Amino acid sequence: MNFQKNLQLKSFAEYKKAYQESIKDPETFWDSVADTFYWHKKWDKTLEWDFSTPEVKWFQGGKLNITENCLDRHLDTLGNKTAIIWEPNDPDEESRHITYRQLFVKVSHFANVLKNNGIKKGDRVCLYMPMIPELAIAMLACARIGAVHSIVFAGFSSTAIASRINDSNCKMLITANEVYRGTKKVNLKTICDEALQNTPSIETVIVYRRTVEPTPMTAGRDVFWFDELQKATKECPAEVMDAEDMLFILYTSGSTGKPKGMVHTTGGYMVGTTFTFQNVFQMDPDDIYWCTADIGWITGHSYIIYGPLAAGATTVMFEGVPSYPDYGRFWEICDKLNVTHFYTAPTAIRALAKQPLELVHQHNLTSLKVLGSVGEPINEEAWHWYNDNIGKSNCPIVDTWWQTETGGIMISPIAGITPTRPTFATLPLPGVQPILMDEKGNELELKAEKAEGRLAIKFPWPSMARTIYGNHERYKDVYFSAYPNKYFTGDGAYRDATGNYRITGRVDDVVIVSGHNLGTAPIENAINEHEAIVESAVVGFPHDIKGNALYAYVTLYNGISPNDTLTKEIKELVSKSIGAIAKPDKIQFVSGLPKTRSGKIMRRILRKIASKDVSNLGDTSTLLNPEIINKIISNSL
């Protein structure tokens, strides 16, 4: 097949043709995509894989550097185009517009700082930084010289930093002295100093001065970013990497509590993220793209930095929060920058939907072309609010399903090309082969009928994680042991008669009530339809007769008080939408739900509270709002 240089599919017919070819002959399909990038040496073998081991290798023998594809190759044609627009926390502070040529120079310059401080190919470097351009510069500088970056979200505790540094034996830590977050100023350096008491592998700490406040520095270990730039030259040739060389490690929560360091490699990740970015979002050359995630998460890696820059797009970085100085900040930025593509989390959408619509209406959102959601399944009420009030029913919503482990988007509408359906991630992207498995481990064949089961993937894709750092056995156990020769996503899914997928939630969010398997996501979706309710979380708890019963934690809009009528209406909604079997036995009204910094509701903790097992809730320091837990416990039913 002949791909256009920009890789974009332009019609539903093109999508169907590309999808069929990608299934029939995956290697030829991905060869044609990979051919559009710059390689020092073309690969000898497109794919070698064995899910039983599990070992996956893409583009073996290929030589490249991802930063040459994100920066160098654009200089002749896009050198003066804005690569990154940085919007600060404080709306009165000046924005920064960095062109591709400026970014290239800054990355090369800082890459030499890394080399001057003893960092070489294969070394691990931990980044604990706010959402400032220097975070993007530092991660790209690591990739420039073949160092492996491990980015830790700059809201995690010192314990979380130390555990990640020690797990991957990082040689350097890059941080900032302070960070602005709304009205709060957080001293990152103090948190790092606490972490560094127990991190013997760290030799150097580079500190970027985000504020003018005095910063305590440890002699012989700590150096300032700006001082180090004065000692470095500005030209740095890219290290030639093998396609399967490590690009980064990114830690994700483990069910056991110990984080998993997911390893992503260079060639396949680059090909997969760029291809999915260009197709899902369907960007035009002058578009302005904004993903509101933090670079500390996979969404930020893939769809703020690597995918957009490799595609030659203009990408927005935002330092602040959606509520400061008021809840209209997202819309103010969209208006100010003429944002065309807006990609955010359902958690943020629900929080913004709770606010007066005047905060939306006072800003001009006519520049918007495409809306996206990421991080969890979007409930129907939030989808419609987003569609009606932000997109004005003119913007396709790409409800993207993927994971840290997948590296890139797997199931999603292609904006304006393939059909959308509220709450559905819809169709798999070319090259992705999802399947549904029943309880006995049998594949539910794709027929013209509905099906529900556990979501697995039966064939490798380029951007998939290759292992868990230092623990390949755990990688095998977690992802490849549930079903022989298949990658198990951990998610349940529903597939309609036309092949559209809706993610129903984590499989551990399936509760067996009186012998019935009940996914909690559809129940939450039904509860959230109530006009008084912002969001909910449903978990199972032990029941003498049913085996398990359902416990619903419900957050109400401001100004609405819990009452018996509301409880009754919630149960009737669930009964009408799903069935009487799905009615929660207990409904607790709460002021908020415990969430990770990425917006994921910590149902593990809620299950323990519902089961009255609160003696060991595990590490709650990395939650966005740990204080909410005691409130929920004290009012539990």
Image (tube, grey):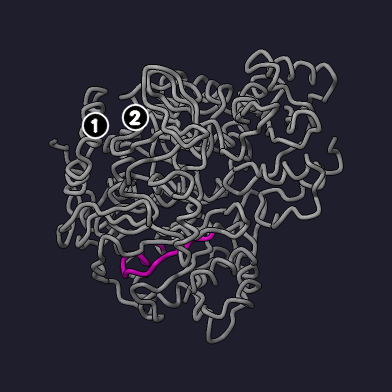
Asked which secondary structure carries label 1, the reply is: loop
Q: Residue at x 31, y 70 (%)?
A: 145
Q: Work out whether residue 61 or residue 104 is closer to the camera in this orientation and state it.
A: 61
Disc 2 marks which residue? 414
- Marks 2 and 1: CB-CB under 8 Å? yes
Considering only vertical position in the picture, is 403 above or below 11?
A: below
Horizontal relation, residue 361 to residue 619: left or right: left
Q: Outermost residue toward the top?
A: 576
Q: Residues within 10 Å of mark 1 (few under 14, many from 20)?
A: many
Name the disc covering residue 9, or none.
Answer: 1
Residue 553 showing in the rendered view: no
Question: Residue 370 lies in magenta, yes or no?
Answer: no
Q: Amino acid at mark 2?
A: Ile
Q: Residue placed at 35% from the left, 34% from the top?
A: 281
Magenta residues, as a range? Answer: 139-152
View extreme (left): residue: 2
Q: Quadrant of the C terminus?
A: top right
Question: Image point 65% across, 24% down: which residue?
Answer: 528
Residue 144 in the magenta stretch? The answer is yes
User: In terms of depth relative to the viewer, which is nearer, 437 or 592?
Assistant: 437
Residue 600 in the image: state x and y as whole percent: 60, 43
> Horizontal and vertical percent for residue 360?
56, 27
Q: At which x and y percent is residue 3?
A: 16, 37
Query: Where, by quadrant of the figure, is residue 238 drawn?
Result: bottom left
> Quick one: which residue is furthest to the bottom in this view?
220
Q: Of the two numbered discs 2 and 1 on the same chain, state the one appearing first in sequence.
A: 1
Question: Considering depth in this image, is 391 or 22 the residue closer to the camera?
Answer: 22
